[in-house]
Image (spheres, helix red, strand yellow):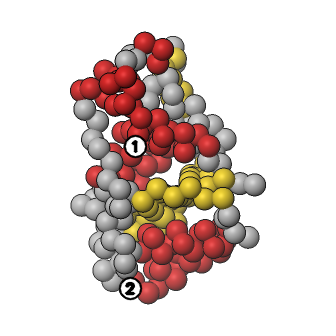
């Protein structure tokens, strides 16, 4: 059975286009085994000096405080490692990803755990996974010069080893929202075909 990890990053719980698109993706794919992480409902901490020093201390040498500092990150990484398909709802806020999504990325991008350094550069350790990113924006066209979200997400997922990334977009909803949402739903139907 395919295991899904769903990450919702929209601050809106009602009327969120990315949440609606993810609901549609889950329905169309017939996803049954889903771990859900709602970043708006349970805010993640920012990384701190304690977190960084704990992360760079070898696991077998961490004291209780360091283990506690990494406990939530360890849980998030385990969810990511366990999933076959990662579903990310990523609204564009102020031309980029929401701070909640950036906090999640900071907590799962860990040297020696989800990527490693080699003589030729970083190597992602999460190979073989698929990511589907549902993006929505009020006025920022996805892929435009003012979109700093989609390229960042594609890059960071690839950095972790997730190279099979599909975007479902309903962007620049300030004009023609109904048509753009219908188009995004059409993209989702093609994914499930």
- Residue at figure coordinates x 66%, y 73% from the top left: 28
Q: Name which quarter of the figure residue 123 lies in.
A: top right
User: Vertically, is 111 above or below 141?
Assistant: above
Foreground pick, 190 / 102: 102
Vertical position of residue 57 compared to residue 188: above or below: above
Work out whether residue 169 or residue 26 is closer to the camera in this orientation and state it.
Answer: 26
Give the image location of residue 85, x and y in percent: 62, 52
| Mark 2 / mark 1, whichever is N-terminal | 1
Picture quadrant where residue 189 is located: bottom right
- Identify the disc placed on residue 19: none
Residue 12 at least partly seen: yes
What secondary structure is found at the residue carrying circle 2? loop
> x%, y% of residue 142?
40, 63
Q: Which residue is drawn at 53% across and 79% down?
A: 183
Q: In the shown orientation, is residue 138 left or right of residue 84?
A: left
Asked if disc 2 and disc 1 are in contact, CB closer than 8 Å, the reply is no
Residue 141 shows up from this direction: no
Identify which residue is drawn at 52% across, 17% down. Answer: 118
How many numbered tags mark residues here? 2
The CA distance from mark 2 to mark 1 is 32 Å
Above/below status of 163 relative to 5: above
* Residue 62, picture quadrant: top left
Q: Which mark is residue 105?
A: 1
Q: Residue shown at 65%/48% (left/top)?
A: 84
Q: Where is residue 57 in the image (x, y as percent from the top left)?
A: 39, 16
Q: Is residue 27 left or right of residue 92?
A: right
Residue where numbered disc 2 is placed: 176
- How packed mark 1 is, by other alpha carbons closer than 10 Å (few <14, some 14-19, many 20 or more), is some
Q: In which quarter of the image is the N terminus?
A: bottom right
Numbered disc in front, either 2 or 1: 1
Residue in front for this viewpoint, 64 or 73:
64
Q: In this view, does 108 lie to the left or right of 137?
A: right
């Amino acid at each position: 059975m395919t295991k899904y990890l769903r990450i919702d990053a929209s601050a809106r719980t009602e009327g969120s286009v990315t949440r609606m698109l993810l609901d549609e993706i889950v329905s169309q794919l017939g996803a049954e085994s889903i771990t859900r992480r709602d970043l708006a409902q349970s805010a993640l901490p920012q990384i701190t000096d304690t977190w960084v020093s704990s992360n760079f201390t070898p696991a077998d040498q961490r004291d209780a405080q360091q283990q506690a500092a990494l406990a939530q990150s360890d849980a998030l990484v385990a969810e990511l490692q366990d999933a076959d398909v990662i579903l990310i709802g990523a609204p564009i806020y102020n031309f980029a990803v929401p701070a909640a999504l950036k906090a999640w990325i900071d907590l799962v991008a860990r040297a020696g755990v989800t990527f490693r350094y080699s003589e030729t550069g970083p190597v992602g350790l999460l190979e073989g996974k698929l990511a589907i990113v549902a993006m929505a924006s009020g006025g920022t066209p996805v892929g435009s010069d003012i979109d700093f979200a989609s390229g960042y997400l594609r890059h960071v997922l690839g950095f972790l080893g997730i190279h099979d990334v599909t975007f479902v977009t309903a962007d620049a909803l300030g004009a023609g929202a109904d048509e753009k949402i219908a188009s995004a739903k059409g993209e989702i139907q093609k994914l499930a075909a």
